[in-house]
Amino acid sequence: MNAAPPTLRAIEEAWRRVQLARHPQRPRTLDLVARIFEEFVELHGDRGFRDDPAMVGGPALLDGRPVMVIGHQKGTDTDSNIFRNFGSPHPEGFRKAQRLLRLAEKLGMPVVTLLDTAGAFPGPAAEERGQAEAIAASIKQMTSLDVPIVVVIVGEGGSGGALAIGVGDEVLALENAVYSVISPEGCASILWRAPEKAPEAAAAMRMTAADQLELGVIDGIIREPDGGAQEDHDATAKAIREALLAAFGRVTRLDEEALLATRYARLRSIGVVNETAVEALQPAEEATLRRRLGRLLRLPGVPRRPRWSDVWPSGDDTNDNEGGA
Amino acid sequence: MRIKFPLGRRDAPTDAWTKCPTCESQIFNKQLERNARVCPTCGHHFRMSVGERLDLLVDEGSFVERDAGLTSGDPLGFHDQQAYPDRLEASHIKTGLREAAIWGTAKLEGRAVAIGLFDFRFMGGSMGSVVGEKVARCFEGALAERIPAIVVAASGGARMQEGTLSLLQLAKTTAPLARMDVAGIPFISVLTDPTTGGVLASFASLGDVIVAEPGALIGFAGARVASGTVGEEMPEGFQRSEFLFEHGFVDLVVPRAELRATLGRLLRVLPVAAADATWPEAGERAWGPIGVLSGIAERLGGAVSETIGIDVEEEGANGAGPQASPASTAPREPVRPVEERDR
């Protein structure tokens, strides 16, 4: 594929999806949970610091069978959004999720996660309490959790904060959901040094559900009602419920060992890697007798032994951080 | 900050002096190199290339690079102000590296390790599919050979140019760590300036032991990401090694001059668990000579089955975890008979 700037059409289309995924009337996790599951009991607290309202979860029944439900929770108006921190969890949110995952494992309950966050909160308080560790530990726990996990991206799948509860045996996305390594605004502010280039960044990162399916990051797309999920919460929930039942029909067929092996293989295979056989580099040296003896006797004029820094030396130490998120 | 080396591959040796960004003193480049790129006046730790890092840490002649032929594709056809393949090429020319990380087997103070190293100058040390693959293979190599893993991180985070494929590298690099937990293989994470974003939010935060260099920038959200996302400026000095140490997310802050010795000591005190991964009964954990002897006998029996796995080269062949240091009396110490194959 030729690298070329995204076309105007691609930019418009990507940005339209981003705005639908962020639509203020889009059904939130708890709206969906009430419609998809029965007897949901929300559990609170990470048992260490506090209850994070940006992350919700607890046991429920799906078609009569117990499951553990975990999801990001955005608000619906200014007040509830402030309470929910706009759906961006602090470390204690991820640690609450970890605690619920442990309970699911203990009781052998399959797990459903609903992703809808712009990203983990990047503020000073979050840093102080180990945001990176909290995300890393959640991801690791999910890679080896011995119960089936089905993930549904229902709105924004924003970076590490989304992936922290986004590792599963099947990953599905609503039609207008988006999934990205960094928010389009964040990407634009780093690569274009201009946050207003967010639509261009959204197109370049190929963050729509259709793109994600093509890249092999997700396994299926759940159709939304005409115009988007905000038009009909009931119909959206019904579509998710049907997709969940079908997905569990597939993944619960595997025994525990096969389940974990398949999940591992799936994660290991993601990405595009070209592999060619090349000679591994070595610091070059003609180990002549003169040099060997010279070094042994510390004679002057004998060149020092070649080092790895000759192969990979320091050069310009410019501060261009053009790739990291 | 611009540093040029007379010994580098650049044809025209220009600047012989480097200005320290912390104390502003002028350092003669040769002196900086001799001092492992640490400012002799104030102790500021300059960034290192993977080559300098190898010279600093591993036993001479012991490092064998693995999977050197892995290179990135351009799965998204990514183009911002520059095309992704052009950025890759520019980094390759600048550093001589094919990607932002390398891995291989080496010895560190005589002990075999699987070691991965990041180079920040290659696209900010960012982790895309290939870097993720190398880190995962480093851990899987440690698993197969039953040797400890060390990764020296220096990264801005996940590589935006590969989109969610980069994001998923967080899971790809983390999954083998869960297997190492079961297998009883230690992982030492070394955080250097800077380690941020997706690299910190995955394997780098999950070391059994986490060591950081002094003054390194270590944090989840880079300042630009944070201010771009929440419009909030980070307080100065907030994401430094010492701050993480204070808050309990780093075990040790170790000056570069002591890094190799510290890692050597950690490798001596962190055993690779016995291959059957069962904790011995209390009665079997004898600390006397009989316990040691039966331990050796067990190892002899298990040695053959343990050396299968990936194609083992000589340097990496002995899966030795901590061998007996003279003073050690630990009963479960994995003494390896195959070790004699090494010179």
Image (cartoon, coloured by chain):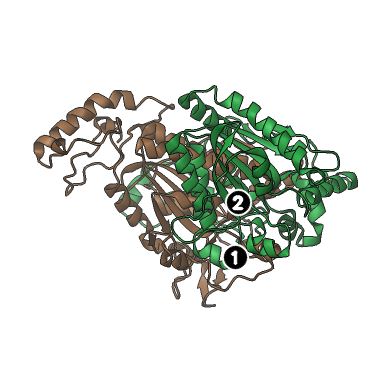
Q: Is residue A23 above or below residue B240?
A: above
Residue located beneath label 1 in the image = A123
The answer to whether residue A205 is left or right of residue B246 is: right
Is residue A319 in view? no
Type of amino acid at the residue the image marks with label 2: Gly
Tell me where residue B260 sits by quadrant: bottom left
User: Mark 1 falls within which chain?
Assistant: A
How many other residues sit within 10 Å of disc 1, few (<14), some (14-19) or many (≥20)? many
Residue furthest front as drawn? A39
Q: Earlier in the sequence, mark 2 or mark 1?
A: 1
Q: Position of residue B306 (x, y in %)?
A: 33, 27
Residue located beneath label 2 in the image = A161
The answer to whether residue B35 is left or right of residue A43 is: left
Q: Which quadrant is the C terminus of chain B positioned in?
A: top left
Q: Judge by depth and name the residue closer to the eye, A274 or A114.
A: A114
Chain letter tied to brown: B
